[in-house]
Image: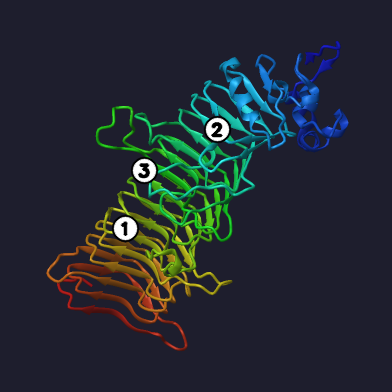
Amino acid sequence: MKTGKDGGTRLSRRKLLASLGLTGAAFASGGLLKAFGSAEGNVMEAVYGNPPGLNASNGNPPWLLNSRTFNVKDWGVVGDGNTPGDRNLIQSKMAELQPGDVLYFPPDVDILCQQAIDITVPKLRVTGSGRLRLGADNTYIMRIYGDDVIVDGLIFHNPAGLKRMGEPHGQGTRSGAVEIRAHRVTVTQCQIDQMLIGILVNSGSSTVEYTGTRIVNNQITNCLGAGREDLGDAVCVFGSDAVVANNYITCKSGEDPRIGINIEALVHVGWPVQRNQDGHGAVVGNVVVGGFRRAIHIEADGVSVTGNAVKGQTFWGIMNYGSRNVISNNVVESPKYKTAPPEMGWNPVTSGIQIYRGKAVIVEGNTLLGGSANGVRVYKQAEGVTIKGNQLIGDSPSNTQFGIGIFIDEAHGSIIEGNMIAAGSCSGRGIGIWKAKELIIKGNHVKGCGAEGMKLEGTVGVRHDTLIEGNVVKNNVGRAVFLANYSFTTLCGNNITDDQLSKTQTEGIYLYNTDDCLI
């Protein structure tokens, strides 16, 4: 219990919710506004009241009483979305702030930003439900230079759709909502709409790799694109030890944005010791929808990509360029193109999950819906990849299938184990191997593919030393298991059958120009 200025008592929010129980908690979160006064307020104000000395008419939130709260309206901003001087006024007041202060943007302001608001004070909380409007195509709305800053609840918008993309690849100015050049910054509960770049952690211009970023529970919608490979990310982290979690991300129809979530650690020769050798971080529980070239791109080591749902991308659902990463329990509605539309000027092989580079990557427990050329594709720059316990399913509503379910392109030492390749999921083979050695293909269920259940193609005169064990290969078209130029292979304990009334599986195990195999 606390005593207010009027001598009355104020029940702490924690005690209030505990005394009310679950039903009361729902009441407190939805019904207290009317009970405690104006519908213009919020639940926190209703429970806590306004701290002494703050102007209730400006909608100040009731933060901890020992925090100093600065309402931008008290500084005299117009807040109509058309006044360039508002940003300059706020910037001029930044020198008055101290670590631990709260900078508050009330819901009735819209701040035009033709230049970025630079947050230079560490441990500042920038909050509210006010709007900040992009006013130029060569700036961010907010730049954060102070460590341990929290930005929460703000609305960043770009109603004019401003973007600049005329400079050469990788050069020139960028525009967007938030640029971070500091450690341990948190951006949460914000709404970001129609930006070329939503949130950027920009270690690229520094000799220090920024760490500890938290980008959590934001809505980043209608992202813009530039039709090229250096622009158009909803979240881009050039840094390490970051968490990107529970964000909802979409792109604007008709745009060609690059990436929904990009994690890229900066390890460059000649950088000082402050850089991190590994990215380390987590991309968890995000939803990425729409025509990004890829939904999630990991170009770092030691990152977990878990529990995300992605759909509608153009090239890839999830792309990996790093080592020791774990890609698990995601739902990937793969791109519906076998090859990208010709107007994009680039024609890569599409896939739901693509491992382009890296060692000891784990791809486990994911559900992939068909449409792309491959469900999971591993390139020769990768090694020792484990593909385990994934489900590949044809996308029935759109009647689309993978060309090949799991494809290994010269990625030696990989393990393909316990995957379910469902009937109708692949128009071609279920598992395809091209010149890869020292594989373990074990315990997979490959059913009803439009071509071979498994086809392994090797090189004459090379030992492939591969184990094919305990798989169920059933009701495919043509050969169940086909080895071509793939010597020194062991096949044991596989269940190869065709129980259809009209048989389609013509041979069980077929060897072509293949020697020294144990069956």
Drawn side of residue 219 relative to residue 229, left or right? right
Tag 1–tag 2 contact (CB < 8 Å): no
Furthest toward the bottom, the residue is: 502
Q: What residue sits 48% from the left and 64% below the top?
A: 335
Type of residue at label 2?
Answer: Ala
Q: Secondary structure at mark 1?
A: strand
Look at discs 3 and 1 and give the one toward the viewer.
3
- Residue 415 — which label? 1
Is 126 displayed left or right of 338 in the figure? right
Which numbered disc, 2 or 3, marks the residue closer to the eye? 2
46 is higher (above) or lower (below) than 26: above
Measured from the top left, where is residue 178 in percent x and y?
54, 37
10 Å crowding of disc 3: few (<14), some (14-19), many (20+):
many
In this view, the residue in front, 241 or 256, is 256
Location of mark 2 (residue): 116
Q: Are marks 2 and 3 in contact (CB under 8 Å)?
A: no
Disc nearer the start of the sequence (1/2): 2
Q: Residues within 10 Å of mark 2 (few under 14, many from 20)?
A: many
Amino acid beneath label 1: Ile
Label 3 belongs to which residue? 300
Per the image, label 2 sits on a secondary structure element best described as loop
